[in-house]
Amino acid sequence: MAEESTALTVAETRAIKKALKSEIQGLARYLVEDPLYIEGLLARMRNHTLHPTLQSKLMDYAYGKPKERIEISEAKIVRIIHEFQEEPKVIEGEVVEPTAGTTNNPDN
């Protein structure tokens, strides 16, 4: 007698995911449409204890998310050289002083 395969087909997996997504969306809608939840949300908004992320999302949904733009008026080439004074190091109990004028500039 041949054993039956318990593996799901791609179509069955997609159908299950779609059903789960629908159930989760339904539950989420039930929760956010609950009058007690809405009352609590309004109370938190009015006494300024609503988390800023949630406040921002509500504003985005209510009025639309503003477009984010970065304007570059002028490009400049900048070379950054970081110079630093090394702290003395202790190696095997002896203090080793750094050499004078040490930089991490590869041109030196």
Image (cartoon, grey):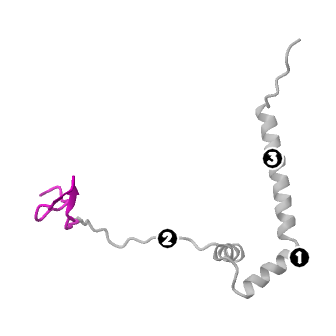
* Residue with the most extreme top position: 1
Instruction: Report the residue marked by disc 1.
Output: 35
What type is the residue that disc 3 sits on? Lys
Write down the region rendered in magenta. 82-108
Residue at image position (19%, 63%) is 88
Let me know if residue 29 is in the magenta part: no
Query: Horizontal and vertical percent for residue 96?
Result: 16, 59
Up/down of 65 relative to 7, above or below: below
Query: Horizontal and vertical percent for residue 61?
Result: 71, 72
Q: Provide the secondary structure element on which disc 3 rests.
A: helix
In 3D space, how far apart are the residues under numbered discs 2 and 1 (Cα atoms)?
Answer: 38 Å
Count residues near mark 2 (Cα–Cα under 10 Å), then give few for <14, some for 14-19, many for 20+.
few
Instruction: Report the residue marked by disc 2.
Output: 69
* Residue with the most extreme front position: 93
Query: Horizontal and vertical percent for residue 103?
Result: 17, 62
Q: Which mark is on residue 18?
A: 3
User: Is most of the magenta stretch helix, strand or loop?
Assistant: loop
Sequence-first disc among 1 and 3: 3
Marks 1/3 in contact by CB < 8 Å: the verdict is no
Residue mark closest to the camera, 2 vs 3: 3
What type is the residue that disc 2 sits on? Arg
Sequence-first disc among 2 and 1: 1
Residue at image position (79%, 35%) is 11
